Image (cartoon, helix red, strand yellow):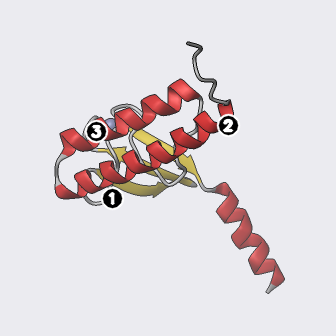
Amino acid sequence: MGKKKVSNNQVRGISRKRMAILVTMSEREALAGNMVRAKRYMELARRISGRNKVPMPPRAMYCHRCSTPLVAGINCRVRLREKKVCTHCLECDSIKRIPFIREIKERRTCRQEQ
Ligand SMILES: [Zn+2]
């Protein structure tokens, strides 16, 4: 009995599908207020991501430290500060900063065209 060979491409496809389902479930639980379950689903999605070297779905918003799905107004605070979007996780107090330099540049070029 040989082990059935599954190509890396197939693994990636399956991983992506399962991660998308887990992220959706996690967000649903977070909105319902069930944070323990929401966290668990996000952890599972991240585990698939790490094990199969597949990036997390781009729309997934989660805390990189405690895996809590971040829903603005429920468990995270979003502020704009010095050309960065600061997402403050209220569960573990970690802050994620994402620069939005590209958007600023785009706005500048738009103005020049007008
Ligand atoms: Zn956190």
Q: Say left or right for 48 vs 76.
A: right
Quadrant field for ligand 1: top left
Q: Is residue 93 visible?
A: no
Residue at the spot of label 2: 9
Residue at the spot of label 3: 39
Q: What residue type is disc 1 on?
A: Ala
Dot 1 falls on a residue whose secondary structure is loop
Q: Say left or right for 114 vs 6.
A: right
Closer-to-camera residue (13/106)? 13
Q: What residue type is disc 3 on?
A: Lys
x, y percent for residue 8? 66, 30
Q: Which mark is residue 72?
A: 1
Q: What residue type is disc 2 on?
A: Asn
Instruction: Tell me which residue sits at (50%, 44%) in the image.
Output: 97
- Cα gap from disc 1 to disc 3, whole angstroms: 16 Å
| Disc 3 residue lies near ligand 1 with CB under 8 A | no
Instruction: Tell me which residue sits at (38%, 56%) in the image.
Output: 78
